[in-house]
Image (tube, coloured by chain):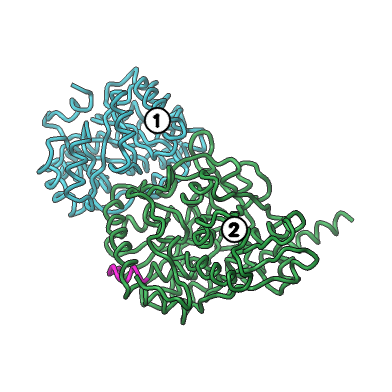
Amino acid sequence: MSRLAHAFEPTGAPKLVTYVTGGDPDRQRSREVLLALARGGADVIEVGVPFSDPIADGPVNQRASERALAAGGTLATTLDLIEDVRREIEVPIVVFTYVNPVLRLGLEPFVARAAAAGVDGVLLLDIPIEESAGVRAALDAGGLDPIFLISPTTTEARLRTAASLGRGFLYAISRLGVTGTRTAVAASARPLVSRIREVTSLPVALGFGISRPEHVREVVTYADAAVVGSAIVQVIADTAAAGGDVAAAVEALVRWLKSDA
Amino acid sequence: MSTRAESPGPVFGRRDPDARGYFGEFGGRFVPETLVAPIEELTTAYLAARQDATFVDELMGLLRHYVGRPTPLYEARRATAGTDVRLFIKREDLAHTGAHKINNALGQVLLARRMGKRRVVAETGAGQHGVATATACALLGVDCVVYMGADDMVRQALNVFRMRQLGATVQSVDAGTRTLKDAINEAMRDWVANVDTTYYSLGSALGPHPYPLMVREFQSVIGQEARADILVQAGRLPDVAVACVGGGSNAMGLFDAFVDDRSVRLVGVEAGGRAIEPGQHAARFAGGQPGVLHGTRSLLLQDPNGNILPTHSVSAGLDYPSIGPEHAWLASLGRAEYCWIDDDAALEGFGWLARTEGILPALESSHAVAWVQRQLPTLTPGTLVLLNLSGRGDKDVETVRTILEQRETTAGGQS
């Protein structure tokens, strides 16, 4: 069983998929953050690749990209970082990226390096299913899972295609818009997950706008996992700006998100 | 499909990309999942609208009675005095709002209204597409939000004022390079969050399919009119058709009518900026590599890690790291050629046309003007040149004045 499939097996505890941008705020502290996510109990770790033009991201993740780029972060250094932490953690890792850095490195070299680094799945933000044939073939050859997004606007036909072509899990977007925290989980979330359940047995992780333990507990009553990104990235930003211990803050946040608090 | 012989309008359905929106290996539809269904809906709506005589007639009526089309084709005799070259200038600067952008903005806002969208978002660089969209929205009674890079808002302050007078909300974009690229990022973020109610009016021949097709077709009226007029005035097709290229909408609008006329040399002029060095220019054919930005695969100015490079041009409208996919395709076929003119030469072109013809060209268009100015001595006698003057320079006089005054100060200090 793949690491990703294993991660979604029911254990009674709420499942948490965490997102951070690789290299934020710098290489060393990002390494500590990834280890802290695992210690805190993250069930899947999504590592974002810093990019100059993150059109699907809100301000919090945009600034994370800017910090990582300023510290020299690239797709290549992000894969190096993953390879580095993979020696110490078993948590499945998904690379979350815009396609241009991947195209620049080359699809096959990217897959080869990602596979060697211990990456489990790849989510390409701006590659819809219709453009994904080449990517899927390359990922398949490297034994990596293609992760597809499902949005409230995804049609029934495309949902079926994504469900048949995706592996590992499907990432459901709770609402229209870019990444970022909200005070409540969108009302569109539950019906979206129901629609997905009707066509596939793949695990469903629900993200966008989830930032508190009560959100997580609510989401896992109907989805297999909750995805938290911007809330963690914001803590990294605030703690780094205050000169605090970023890894300790992230670990505490993840424990809180998974708690009954 | 409606056509009127007495005044050619835009041409629809002449050279469609493939079903996935590709021109050769360029184009496509690289968007986040949330936008896929809305873009399919937009494609369906556009393909239906362009075949609907009611839609085309309404657009034609507005182009004639509101925009003031057809725009003149003017022979510039003083500019070419002492040469055997004939230069015809397509006067898009005389279109309502002062540039070709209105041709596309009217088409898209009409489409937005037809689709039942009550809110339109747009990006703008030089401000011309923003002004055109704000104008079309005022005319058609639709809410309008324009995203504009913070740096561009400074250098095009007059256009910001114009948009606000037209009832549009202008949102400053402080992210990234604070220019056109980042304005598009922000407009796309708005669109993805408000896609139920909002139409995205993209101002150039780029972005995901169907935008490159749709924008080119709305702008094809430029080439149609110019072709008809030059056949009357000069009695034959031009030898060269030249236009400036940022995203490339005015150039595609001109080229479109001549792509099948193999004798017509198609020249796109990019912004050479301060120098052809990373971050100092916007000449995609001088160092650009294939890549994906803003939903389309084209040539990109990017670093070895796939991050988009900053660009520079004296003209905000050419200050963009990618180029419309159809241009990349025409270049790959060898059908069109692309070259660059730097900031200094563009300013010379600006002054040259002002002094010889009494026409202040936009700084964007000044790049094409400067190309003609520099080629004049080397063109074969009898050459017939068609230049698209995409916009008027009123918006740029402050920029030009500042630069010229700085030069005088510098020159004075050295003497």
Residue A103 percent location from the top left of the image: 43, 35
Q: Chain letter for green? A: B
> In this view of the protein, can residue A39 be seen by the observer?
no
Residue pointed to by mark 2: B244
Quick one: B271 or B176, which is closer to the camera?
Answer: B271
Q: Is residue A194 magenta?
A: no
Outermost bottom residue? B65
Q: Chain letter for cyan? A: A
Identify the residue shown where x is 60% and y is 49%.
B338
Q: CA distance from mark 2 to mark 1?
A: 34 Å
Q: Quadrant where the C terminus of chain B lies?
A: bottom right
Quarter occupied by residue A259? top left
The amino acid beneath tag 2 is Cys
Identify the residue shown where x is 49% and y is 65%.
B129
> In this view of the protein, can residue A140 be seen by the observer?
yes
Residue B157 percent location from the top left of the image: 57, 68
Task: For mark 1, give the secondary structure.
Answer: helix
Outermost front residue? B235
Residue A227's tag is none
Quick one: B227 or B246, which is closer to the camera?
Answer: B227
Quarter occupied by residue B264? bottom right
- Host chain of mark 2: B
How crowded pointer 2 is (Cα within 10 Å; few <14, some 14-19, many 20+) is rated as many
How crowded pointer 1 is (Cα within 10 Å; few <14, some 14-19, many 20+) is rated as some
Secondary structure mostly taken by the magenta-highlighted segment of the chain: helix
Q: Is residue A244 above or below residue B233?
A: above
Task: For mark 2, give the secondary structure.
Answer: strand
Q: Is residue B149 above or below residue A70?
A: below
- Looking at the rendering, the stretch of residues picked out in magenta corresponds to B110-117
Residue pointed to by mark 1: A107
Residue A68 percent location from the top left of the image: 46, 36
Q: Quadrant where the N terminus of chain B lies?
A: bottom left
